[in-house]
Structure formats: C-alpha cells, structure tokens
Image (cartoon, rainbow, N blue to C red):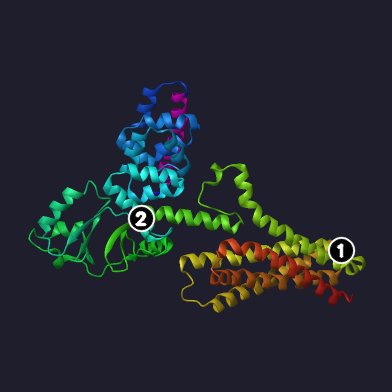
Amino acid sequence: MNEDGTLIQSNSRSELRQLVCSQLQLLLEQSNLEGAKALLVPVQPVDIAEAIESLPESMQVIAFRLLSKEEAIAVYEHLDSTVQQALIEKFKQQEVREIVDQMSPDDRVKLFDELPAKIVRRLLEQLSPEERQNTALLLGYEEDTAGRIMTPEYISLKETFTVNLTLERIRRLAITSEVVYYLYVTDASRHLAGIVSLRELVLSSPETTLDEIMTRDVVYVNTNDDQEEVAKIIQRYDLLAVPVVDKEQRLVGVVTVDDVIDILQDEATEDIYALGGVQSDGENYFQTSIVTVARKRVVWLLVLLLTNTVTGTIIKSQVHVLEKMAILTAFIPLLTGTGGNVGAQSSTVVIRGLNTDDMKDLTTKEVVIREMLAGVLLGLMLGTLATIWAYWLQGNWSVSLSVGISLVAIAILASVAGSALPFLFRSLGLDPALMSAPFITTAVDVVGVLIYFSIARTILGI
C-alpha cells in the first residue's frame, strides 16, 4: 500500500477507537448493557482496554464484566496498572483468581510489582500450583532483568526427538505455550543446545532428528542481564524471542518481542522525563494526582532556583561594572539562554548515543573533542550574529564585541559540559539523563556570567 493509503488507514483506526470509547460510555450511561456488549465484540483487546481506561471509574468494572472470560484475560493484560488495581479491588475472589491465573507469567509479575505486598500474597495463594511456581520463579530475580521479564511458557525439545515426534509435542503444548515460532533444543541436563524454527520442521522428513537440523549458534541472554540490553539484542538480531539461561547455562525462559516493545517505550519515556528534570517511577504521568506531579517536578526546579540565586549574586558583585555600562545587563539572558540550549543539544545526542551504542567505536575523549569543535563552529556563527545584533541595538562596538566573544566562549563551555557530564555521571553510577540537564544549566549560568563580565571588563577597560 502507498504512503497515502497507510495514512488514511491509520487515521481511520484512530477515529474508530475514539468512536468506540464515546459510544461505550453513552451506552453504559443509558444502561444498555446488551448494546455495549455487542459494540465490543469485533473490537481488538488492546482497543477495548483503551476504551475501558477512558471511562469514569464507576463504569470501568461494569464494562469489564461484559467481556467473556477469554476476552477479559486478554484485555486485562493491556490495561494500565492503576486500572488493573482498581478492578482487582472490586472483583469477587473467584473472578480475581480466574483472571490472574490465566495471565501470562511475565504480565502477572508486572501486575504484582504494582500491588501492595499483602494483596500479592493473597493472589499467590489463589494461583494454581504450576502458575504459582512460575510466578515465584520470576519474582525471585532482580527488577529490570531478563529473569524478571521472561516467560517460562515455551516449548523445549530434546536433541534425540524426531521431526514427527516434535510436531506431535507442539500440537499438545501450543495451547499453553506463549512461544511456538521458535523451538528450543536442550540436552539431558537442560543446557541450551540449539534452536529449530517451524519452517525447518515442516521442510524436514518425519524421521529426521533435531540434532541434524537445529542451529547450534544460538543468541541468548542470562537471567541477570539488564532488560535494556535484552531489548537491544532482540532489536540487533531481528528476533521474535530470545532464550534466557541461568548461571549453569540451563534454559529457564524466553523474552518475547512484545515485552521488548513495552521496555523500549518505558525507557524512552523515562529518559525524556529525565531530560526535562522530571522524576519518573513508571506511572502514567497524566493519571497521577496533582500533588504527585508537583513532587516529581519540584526537585530539579529547586536546584535551578538555587542556581539562579548564585547567578544573581555574581551579577550583584559586578555592580561597579554595571554602574559604568548598564547596557551589559540586557544581554545576560541571551548569553545564558543560548548556552543552555547548546549544552542541552550536546547532552541529548550523547545520552541518546549511550543508550543506542551509536558511539561504541568512539572513546569518551573523542566524543568530547568532537562536541567541542561543534561548539567552536556554533559559537563563531552565533557570536558573529550576536555582535551585529548587539551593535544595532545600542551602537557601541566595545559592548557588541564583549557579547560576541562571550557567546563563543559560552558555546564551547556548554558543548564540553553537555558532552562530558553524561559520561561522568554514568561512571559514578548515576542516571546521565536525570543528572545532566540541571548541571549543564548550572554550569552555563554561573560560569557563563563570570566569563561575560570578565571579557567585558577587559574590552571596556573597567
């Protein structure tokens, strides 16, 4: 399909989702439960989840109860964690058990991470023995690791199995397994030995054994590998799933591509919030209370407030300069603002490069030097324009040169700080995205003002 056709289809789907949301609420307000149930029949689970989330809280449980058991389980996994918790509190005990027991283990663990410990213990007791064991297995690993996000529902085969026996096993286990497009082969000690695709099975003769057709060079991850690294591996090798092994190289689970998409979205959201100086704990920002929102944003705003106080103190200490040339104050916002923007650009590209391994062939020194040279070029271009602009405003070449030269120096400072600070904070075990933005602003504001007045004093002879 051409680009125009794809765009039209995308817009149509968006309009359809909005229509379902509005119609569902209207039907529930009219107490037309049969109409609401019929409306949801052809709708995909992810879209039903979005429609339920858009409803007032009092209607969410009513809409959810209209779904069949199979639909309810599929829809529940797509709901936001806050909506999941609210529904659990209103369900009867048997309903909770059926829904939670049928969830995939990795999605169930995500839900348990958000619930109070008391409720988690109660839910674990209600699970079937097999599901309780699977969930306990995942809960035993550290957060944000491959072990925590993997699913233990996969199809494992032995090297001695024939193709015919393998296909029979797939037919028997496919209903309870989350992953059927990759089949993992293990030896007698459950060590990962190889991988077989469904295509290879179909094209092979029935009596062929798996050790003859399996691929032995398998891409895998360890249970304690960071989830971001797992996402990068799946992305790098274009995998639909990646096997997870423990310290003894035994196969214990599989991470699927749908889990990776969620991880990438969550990590991108966290980094974007961090670059803006907003603390993020994984919750939906627009569904949290105003008090929580203020608490998330106030920390770095206080840091910047103190920074501005320091900057003001520096300006106050230069009062003898300003008494002789008060026009200098007019260009302080231009210099600090431009420097902050240059530093933010440098930190953004460096932080992005750290997250995507785009800089794997460059050393820290090479990256900083590269950004410093970019700062020199930017400073010369912006400084020239600022000099001309400043002269046009006040007609004094000495003041104009002070502004232009200061802008060159500040641009270089901002580029170096913006590229070096992410590396520094990462080496200290701190989040580069969260720490860099306010510190860059601090460095540019304080040091930039000092540079400006020092250059101005020299050129003006004050």
Is 16 inside the magenta-drawn segment? yes
* Vertical arrangement, residue 291 with respect to residue 394, above or below: above
Badge 1 marks a residue whose secondary structure is helix
**Horizontally, is 273 left or right of 340 in the view?**
left
**Horizontally, is 268 left or right of 45 in the view?**
right
Q: Amino acid at mark 2?
A: Leu
Q: What residue is at 47 percent from the left and 23 percent from the top?
A: 29
Question: How far separated are the C-alphas under marks 2 and 1?
Answer: 65 Å
* Front residue of 29 and 451: 29
* Vertical arrangement, residue 387 with respect to residue 122, above or below: below
Identify the main secondary structure in magenta. helix
- Using the rendered image of the protein, determine whether residue 325 is visible from the camera's viewpoint: yes
Mark 2 surroundings: few (<14), some (14-19) or many (≥20) residues within 10 A: many
Is 27 inside the magenta-drawn segment? yes
Q: Which mark is residue 327?
A: 1
* Front residue of 273 and 177: 177
Q: What residue is at 22 percent from the left and 69 percent from the top?
A: 216
* Front residue of 4 and 15: 15
Q: Amino acid at mark 1?
A: Ile
* Front residue of 404 and 263: 263
Q: Earlier in the sequence, mark 2 or mark 1?
A: 2
Q: Position of residue 169 (x, y in %)?
A: 15, 52
Q: Position of residue 6 (x, y in %)?
A: 40, 46
Q: What residue is at 55 percent from the left and 78 percent from the top?
A: 366
- Using the rendered image of the protein, determine whether residue 240 is visible from the camera's viewpoint: no
Q: Is there a contact, CB below 8 Å, between mark 2 and mark 1?
A: no
- Of all residues, the one furthest to the right in this rendering is 324
Q: Which residues are magenta?
A: 4-28
User: Which quarter of the rendering shows the C terminus?
Assistant: bottom right
Location of mark 2 (residue): 138
